[in-house]
Image (cartoon, rainbow, N blue to C red):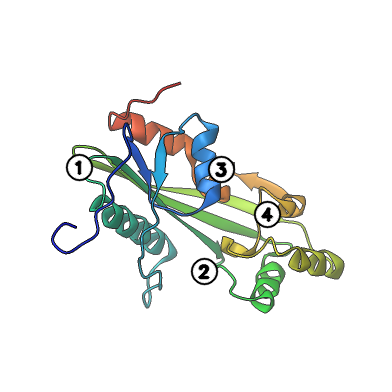
Amino acid sequence: MENGKKVFLPPNGLELVLASASPRRSDLLKQIGLENFLADAPDVDETIKKLEAPKNYAARLALEKAETVRRRHSRCFVLAADTVVTCGTRVIDKPASKNQAEKCLRRLSGRSHKVLGAFVVIGADNQYVKRLVISSVTFKRLDEKEISNYLASGEWIGKAGGYAIQGRGAAFIKKIQGSYSNVVGLPIHEVYNALRGLGFKYKT
């Protein structure tokens, strides 16, 4: 305990902490050879503020997550991210029910939407990098059978926008402009460059 707060001590040799419980983000880091990291999800209020722009919302949450976890891991690099899906000016949240997931799919059907991926990297010397990466995704027009089958699969659960581009949802994507991994959950090219820019010793 430190000042009455629980402190997470890093394992031997740990250099990076991912401020997320998302298995997709962990998988993306492992994909580029980062294995020795700890996933430590912060408990932050993710309620969007009144009149808050989606870009500001994503950036604010990424920074809050990074700062929260940094207080528990002062000797490590900390990476935090937040993904926001927007269709027009509307934020498409993670659906909490099958009914909400259906509304998400119908709203995205036959249209293009934006995926806003904000991330923050805090270095060992407390310097940090903030980035916002935007990808554009175009859905095919979904028929009733496609919607019902996707809802029955349960893949929509816990997914921003109500779909997973790395899963069955890939069949619905006509076009993507920008970072694919950003749509999955983490713009990995930009994250890699940010880590290296802050002096992270990337081991190939």
Q: Position of residue 158 (x, y in %)?
A: 58, 63
Residue type pointed to by label 3: Ser
Q: Nearer the viewer, mark 2 or mark 1?
A: 1
First-in-chain label (1 vs 4):
1
Left or right relative to 155: residue 161: left
Q: Position of residue 30 (x, y in %)?
A: 51, 35
Tell me the residue that label 3 is attached to. Answer: 181
The quadrant in which residue 128 appears is top left
Q: Is residue 60 left or right of residue 146?
A: left
**Disc 2 from disc 1: Cα separation:** 32 Å
Q: Position of residue 4 (x, y in %)?
A: 16, 64
Query: Mark 4 is on which residue type?
Result: Thr
* Residue under pointer 4: 138
Q: Is mark 2 in CB contact (under 8 Å) with mark 1?
A: no
Q: Spatial distance from mark 4 to mark 3, Cα to Cα?
A: 15 Å
- Cβ–Cβ below 8 Å for labels 3 and 1? no
Q: Under tag 3, what secondary structure?
A: helix
Q: Secondary structure at mark 4?
A: strand
| In the depicted structure, whether residue 138 falls above or below residue 15 | below
> Can the viewer see residue 178 in this picture?
no
Mark 3 closeness class: few <14, some 14–19, many ≥20 residues within 10 Å = some
Report the amino acid beneath label 2: Val
> Which amino acid type corresponds to the residue marked 1 in the rendered image?
Asn
